[in-house]
Amino acid sequence: MTLGAKMEYLEEIYLRYKKANHKEKSVILNEFCENCGYHRKHAIRALNTFKRFTKPKPKKRGRKPVYDKASIKEPLERIWLTANLPCSKRLKAIIPLWLPGYAQEFGGLSIDVIKALRRISPATIDRLLKPHRMKYKRRGRSTTKPGTLLRKQIPIKTNQWDETRPGFLEADTVAHCGDSTDGMYANTVDFVDIATCWTEQRAVWGKGERATLEQIKDVEESLPFPLLGFDADNGGEFLNYHLFRHFTQRRKPIQFTRSRAYKKEDNAHIEQKNWTHVRQWLGYHRLDNPRVVPLMNDLYTSEWRFYHNFFQPSIKLLEKKRVASKIIKRYDKPKTPYERVTESPEVSASVKRSLKEQYAKLNPFRLRKTMEKKLAKIYATIHKKRR
């Protein structure tokens, strides 16, 4: 037997020898001496001082993992995927809101799993979901054409993020133009309330002033609080006499302001929602069939607004200050727009009561399924035209 073969044989019997009792070790030594021609004392020394070719993995220190179980990972991944891949801190707030709907849709979970999901930390969520995370790196194009007629009449406002009372909206349009801005295509008019993060979306064909005004009126009726202020960019769909008269020529005029030209940070709240509430769902496809507009509005005014306002928590920036060379930010706890509205003292008790009754009837998993069906119908309408 060659030296290499003897070393391989030694490595094979090494673990068996270490785990054996006294009698079994004696039998292993006899076999080892007979096969390799070693003296018994040399064989004992070789087995006691042997260093393996492949080192065994060291045992993990600390307590056994609690969350690395399929019974916990499966509902966590389902909720994460259905909630449109939120960050771990938002998912931590989403889990208790979605667990009742999960039980209705996929069956009940054991008490131990429910307790584990409720007390799981954001860091553990990141560790469990790390193999499944996807990164989105896509940029859009600006389609804002300046409206110059009313720039002097409509004042600039840049401190709208200081508002703490519900009713102050930021608005912007998202163009579904694909790779080219030529021709006509659908646009989404996006709205967000600064205090509660309540969002509304409506679709219009092109960027007509009257069509945009009609959707703004519809949004104003749908809000759970009265409209107090309206801030938009410098696009012609907002800076026009129709909208100016609508807000200023009423018994209780509404504060109508605009951002600075080419300063997106002035509308930071709505720019964020353009991505999370529109682009992540509808992408950058070209929606150039006018038939998709009623389909989009049917989606926006039903399942869409319930899904995002009742079951999607957001994190608000409370304070931002500079200490030496560092910028320190302080955020509040993740809350849904529905929770912020019900906590606001400015909203009437009757509205809160109706929202709570509405919330009790909703299931986020069923809302997501219906949304996906309607989105598929929208894309099918676009494909039919192109054929």
Image (cartoon, rainbow, N blue to C red):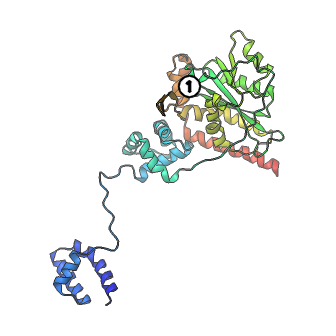
Say which residue appears at 22% left-offset and 79% top-offset.
46
Q: Secondary structure at mark 1?
A: loop
Q: Quadrant of residue 185?
A: top right
Q: Quadrant of the N terminus?
A: bottom left
Q: Quadrant of residue 42?
A: bottom left
Say which residue appears at 65% left-offset and 19% top-offset.
229
* Residue 208 % position (x, y): 81, 29
Q: Is residue 358 above or below residue 61?
A: above
| Residue 348 falls left or right of residue 292 | left
* Residue 308 % position (x, y): 59, 34
- Residue position for label 1: 196
* Residue 89 % position (x, y): 47, 39
| Residue 121 falls left or right of residue 375 | left
Question: Callout 1: few (<14), some (14-19), or many (20+) C-alpha neighbours within 10 Å?
Answer: many
Say which residue appears at 27% left-offset and 78% top-offset.
13
Nearer the observer, 22 or 263: 263
Nearer the observer, 70 or 44: 44
Amino acid at pointer 1: Thr
